[in-house]
C-alpha cells in the first residue's frame, strides 16, 4: 500500500507541476477550475507525503538527524530508547538539549574535547558559558568518560605529534604503515613534507573588508603543490586531496586560484598540451605552510580516533580535472570530522611578531593536523 501511494504521489506531483505551468495560458472559468484543482491537489499530496514519512519513521530502526532537525515536526512526540550525539564537543548546550528531549532511556555523547568547541559568535554568550559543551560540562562534573585510544586513520608518523602534544602520548596506532601509502612518485620516504618559503614577498595581509587574513604567496605555493600531486607526474586524483586553512579569506583565494588552474589545464588538454603538473616548483608560501601526505587524521582523547577506515585507502587514478570543486577547499572548522588521503595545509600567518592567530587555540591546530 505504501509503495502504491508513493507511486501515486509522484504521478500527482507531476500533474500538478504541469498544470501550474499552464496557468498563464488559461482564463475565466478554466483558470478558476485549475486553481481549485491545484489547491486541493497540493493539500492531498502533503497528506500523502506526511503519511509516508510517518510510516517510514515508525518502521525505521535507526533515525539520523541534525540536532536542530531533532526538534522538527516529524519527530514531535517520538521518544527513543537510545540517543547518540556525535561531535558532541562542538555542539552548544541548547542544541544538544533538543536531542536529549527525545531520549527515554540512554544518551551517549561522542566527542573529543581536544578538538573544536562550539562556535559562539557573541562574546557575552561566550562569557556566560555557551562555548562550553554539554560533553565538557559532564567531564567537569566528574562523569567518567570511555576513552578510545587506538587510532585507525593516520600513518603512525603523522599521528605521533598529535598524540604527544594533545593526548599525553596515549594514542596507539591501529593503522599499518604499509597500508598508508603516499601517492605515486611522492618525493619523500616520509608521509609529511614542509614547503618553506620564508622571506619571499607577498605574504600575510588583511583580506578585502578586513575581517580575515590571506597570503597570496602561500596560496600560489599551495596551488602549485596541488597541481603537482594531481598531475601526470603526481598520480593523485583531485578528489583524494583536501586543502585546509584557518581563514575564510585564504579559502576564497585558494578556490579562485584552483579554478583558474583548472581552466588552464582544460585549455591545455583541448589543445593537446597535457594536464597539470608542470611549473617550476613551489612559487612561495608561508614559513609555517606545509604539505601533509599519506593517510591521516583523527585524534583520540575523549572521542578517540576510532572510525575512519579499517583498511588503508589507495589513491584513485588521477583522471579527474583539477578544479576547486574536485579538490575540496575548506576552513579548519569546516573539515572537522572529515578526512582525505592527502591534505595540503595553508597556515597563512607569516610575520615578525610570531602571531599565529586562530591557531593559538590548540584544538584548532589539532584538527588541522589530523585531517590527512
Image (spheres, grey):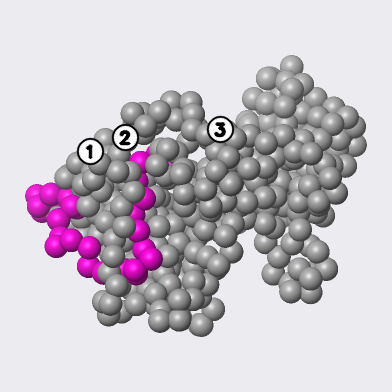
Q: Secondary structure at mark 1?
A: loop
The quarter of the image holding the C terminus is top left
- Please report whichever mark, 3 or 2, sits nearer to the chain's N-terminal start: 3
> Residue 125 is drawn in which quadrant?
bottom right
Q: Is 225 positioned to the left or the right of 89 in the image?
A: left
Q: Is residue 210 magenta?
A: no
Residue 298 seen by the camera: yes
Which residue is located at x 41 percent, y 69 percent?
A: 348
User: Is mark 3 in CB contact (under 8 Å) with mark 2?
Assistant: no
- Please report whichever mark, 1 or 3, sits nearer to the chain's N-terminal start: 3
Q: Position of residue 132 (x, y in %)?
A: 76, 58
Which residue is located at x 13 percent, y 49 percent?
A: 274
Q: Is residue 281 magenta?
A: yes
Nearest the eye: 250 or 55: 250
User: Is mark 1 in CB contact (under 8 Å) with mark 2?
Assistant: no
Which residue is located at x 74 percent, y 22 percent?
A: 61
Q: What is the spatial separation of the Cα atoms under label 1 and label 3, in whole angstroms?
A: 28 Å
Mark 2, residues whose alpha carbon is within 10 Å: few (<14), some, or many (≥20)?
many
Residues drawn in magenta: 269-296
Which residue is located at x 67 percent, y 57 percent?
A: 117
Q: Nearer the viewer, mark 1 or mark 3?
A: 3
Q: What is the spatial separation of the Cα atoms under label 1 and label 2, in whole angstroms?
A: 9 Å
Q: Which residue of the protein is positioned furthest toward the top in this rendering?
A: 1
Q: Which residue of the protein is positioned furthest toward the left in this rendering?
A: 272
Q: Is residue 201 above or below residue 296?
A: below
Q: Is 200 positioned to the left or the right of 106 in the image?
A: left
Residue ID for mark 3: 150
Residue ID for mark 2: 181
Mark 1, residues whose alpha carbon is within 10 Å: few (<14), some, or many (≥20)?
some
Amino acid at each position: 500500500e505504501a509503495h502504491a501511494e508513493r507511486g501515486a504521489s509522484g504521478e500527482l506531483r507531476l500533474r500538478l507541476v504541469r498544470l501550474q505551468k499552464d496557468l498563464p495560458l488559461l482564463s475565466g472559468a478554466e483558470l478558476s477550475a485549475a486553481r481549485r484543482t491545484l489547491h486541493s491537489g497540493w493539500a492531498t499530496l502533503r497528506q500523502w507525503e506526511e503519511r509516508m514519512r510517518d510510516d517510514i519513521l515508525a518502521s525505521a530502526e535507526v533515525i539520523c538527524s541534525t540536532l536542530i532537525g531533532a526538534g522538527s515536526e516529524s519527530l514531535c512526540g517520538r521518544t527513543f530508547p537510545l540517543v547518540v550525539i556525535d561531535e558532541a564537543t562542538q555542539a552548544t548546550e541548547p542544541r544538544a538539549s533538543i536531542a536529549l528531549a527525545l531520549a527515554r532511556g540512554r544518551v551517549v555523547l561522542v566527542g573529543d574535547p581536544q578538538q573544536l568547541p562550539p562556535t559562539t559568535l557573541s562574546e557575552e554568550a561566550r562569557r556566560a558559558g555557551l562555548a562550553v559543551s554539554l560533553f565538557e560540562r559532564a567531564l567537569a562534573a566528574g562523569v567518567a568518560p570511555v576513552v578510545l585510544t587506538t587510532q585507525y586513520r593516520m600513518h603512525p608518523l603523522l599521528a605521533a605529534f598529535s598524540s604527544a602534544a594533545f593526548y599525553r602520548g596515549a594514542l596507539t596506532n591501529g593503522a599499518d604503515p604499509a597500508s598508508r601509502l603516499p601517492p605515486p612518485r611522492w618525493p619523500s620516504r616520509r608521509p609529511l613534507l614542509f614547503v618553506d618559503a620564508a622571506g619571499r614577498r607577498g605574504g600575510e595581509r588583511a583580506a578585502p573588508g578586513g575581517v580575515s587574513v590571506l597570503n597570496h604567496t602561500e596560496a600560489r605555493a599551495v596551488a602549485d603543490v596541488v597541481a603537482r600531486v594531481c598531475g601526470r607526474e603526481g598520480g593523485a586524483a583531485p578528489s583524494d586531496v583536501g586543502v585546509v586553512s584557518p581563514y575564510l579569506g585564504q579559502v576564497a583565494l585558494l578556490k579562485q586560484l584552483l579554478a583558474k588552474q583548472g581552466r588552464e589545464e582544460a585549455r591545455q588538454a583541448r589543445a593537446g598540451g597535457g594536464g597539470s603538473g608542470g611549473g617550476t616548483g613551489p612559487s612561495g608560501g608561508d614559513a609555517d605552510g606545509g604539505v601533509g601526505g599519506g593517510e591521516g587524521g583523527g585524534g583520540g582523547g575523549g572521542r578517540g580516533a576510532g572510525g575512519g577506515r579499517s583498511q588503508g585507502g589507495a589513491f584513485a587514478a588521477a583522471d579527474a580535472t583539477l578544479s576547486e570543486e574536485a579538490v575540496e577547499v575548506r576552513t579548519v572548522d569546516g573539515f572537522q570530522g572529515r578526512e582525505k588521503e592527502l591534505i595540503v595545509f595553508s597556515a597563512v600567518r607569516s610575520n615578525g611578531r610570531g602571531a599565529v592567530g586562530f591557531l593559538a587555540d590548540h584544538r584548532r591546530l589539532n584538527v588541522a593536523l589530523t585531517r590527512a
